[in-house]
Image (cartoon, rainbow, N blue to C red):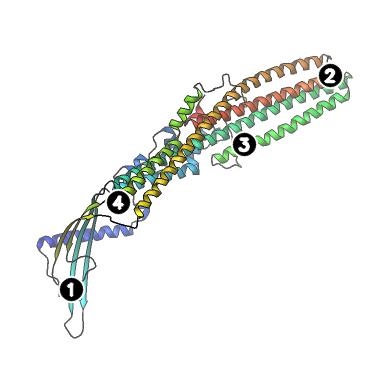
Amino acid sequence: MRLPAPGRRTGRLHRAALPLVQALALAGLLAPAHAQQPLDPWGVMRLAAPADSLAASADPASAACAVQANAPAGTAAQPLTLERAVSLALCTSPRARTAWAGVAAQGAQLGQARAGLLPNLNMAASRTRDHQDTGNTPATTVQANGLNLTMNWLLFDFGARRASITQAEQNLQAALGSRDAALLDTVAEVAQAWYDAQTAAGALAATEVAGGTAAEILKAAEVRVAAGSAISLDAMRARNALAQAQLATARARSNEHIARAALARALGLDVRRPLVLSFEADDGAVPVPASTAAPAQELDTLVGQALASHPALRAARAQIAAAQARVDGASAERWPSLSLSYGNYRNGRPNTALTSSQSREQLVAVTLSIPLFDGFGRSYRIHEQLAGLRAREADAAAAESRIAFEVWRAYQTVQAETTAVAASGELVQGTQEAFAAARARHLAGAIDITEWLAAQREAAMARQEQVTALAAWRNARVRLLAMLGNAGFWATP
């Protein structure tokens, strides 16, 4: 027995819809997952797009990162600059890539939350054949084409969906802040490694200068001993001073290699490959800045700037707003909800027995759901979310205190090291003048080699003090500018 043929309009609907549904289902089953580009009708993934130059240059999917990955860096033909090092690290840092993935995930969660504002539509098409042969009765065959369309729409829920959307929006803002903080930390780490390498290069240059001076003293002592105007003890002392200078140079060269390897590691490069760097000083030494860049603003202004713009604090405040939205959502669960349902069924509902007659069913329902009692579970969920809100507020307060203290400490260190840099420059100049005077007096026979060697040691120590002061000043400056949330601080004069 066959099901009676449907009417002309019904038959056309079946013939048009069934192949389409089957084709779509087959395409969805056979198409590989990576070939299906997800849609973004809400535009939430664009909210995760970089809003500044730092984030844009750090986007792993950007063309800038593709150029950074393929272009050579740190070679003799193309020495590595600080700006290039920062750009390379932003594209290759695992921490930065993790932060980008977190932003994308939060953007997708926002889209899921907004999906609750729209109805859910589902369609099912089927073709069923039921053949029965009992042996005592004639065999029967029933064939049916089914087409079902259902819709469910939550119309009103006293703000539960809005709270969920607000929570997702604030979580996205928190993820954006965490991403920017991760990028800022990455820049700070790379700048720190760069300045460490520059400091190590300056220390090596200082020891090489000291070694050259010691060699000059030894040569002069040997000439005077050969001429009979000095005793052999002077040559021995000069030779010992040269050996000490050579030992210091060897250690400084090792430290310089280690600093370059640490920079390569921070950039994700092979530490075994020699890294050619391009420092600001043409001679490879560490120059004394003509005007050390101490912060011009008052300390309270700097602290206020950090508290207003640091991305970690933006993330902490967004987490507070998300926690408040969770409280609102838990409170909304106590109130009724109103929903609309619609169903259109041709030849029976899904998973029902076939009949020998054609059928068509339409269903419209408006449902009011009123929560009455759940063992006080909703009340305790509100208590839980309130506790989470207080925890996020405490976290934000701790972050504010930490950043304010770090700004204060870095500010004080910059001020102190600025003075130290100037003092070390004066010390280097004074010891060099004293060394020149001691050299002239020794060659004139006015003093012995001991005073000349002492002047040489003082000059070498002064150069090391200058390198140390510059390193401390650079490090304090990096910390201060990073805590202020200044993304391009490595290029700040």
* Foreground tag (1 vs 4): 4
Viewer can see residue 256: yes
- Answer with mark 4 or mark 2, whichever residue precedes in sequence: 4
Which is more toward the observer, 412 or 268? 412
Residue at position x 64%, y 32% in the image: 200
Residue at position x 70%, y 17% in the image: 430
Which is more toward the observer, 486 or 198? 486
Real-space Cα separation, disc 4 to disc 3, in angstroms: 61 Å
In the rendered structure, which amino acid carries the disc numbered 1?
Val
Real-space Cα separation, disc 1 to disc 4, in angstroms: 50 Å
Residue wearing tag 3? 259
Which quarter of the figure is the N terminus placed in?
Answer: bottom left
Residue wearing tag 2? 448
* Foreground tag (4 vs 2): 4
Drawn side of residue 166 relative to residue 412, left or right: left
How dense is the environment of label 1, judged by Cα within 10 Å: few (below 14), some, or many (20 and up)?
A: some
Tag 2, which secondary structure?
loop
Q: In this picture, is 281 found above or below 193?
A: above
Task: Name the residue furthest bottom.
Answer: 136
Tag 1, which secondary structure?
strand
Residue at position x 85%, y 20% in the image: 224
How dense is the environment of label 3, judged by Cα within 10 Å: few (below 14), some, or many (20 and up)?
A: many
Real-space Cα separation, disc 3 to disc 2, in angstroms: 40 Å
Q: Position of residue 413 (x, y in %)?
A: 58, 27
- Answer with mark 4 or mark 3, whichever residue precedes in sequence: 3
Tag 4, which secondary structure?
loop
Residue wearing tag 1? 142
Instruction: Give the quadrant of residue 193.
Output: top right
- Answer with mark 3 or mark 2, whichever residue precedes in sequence: 3
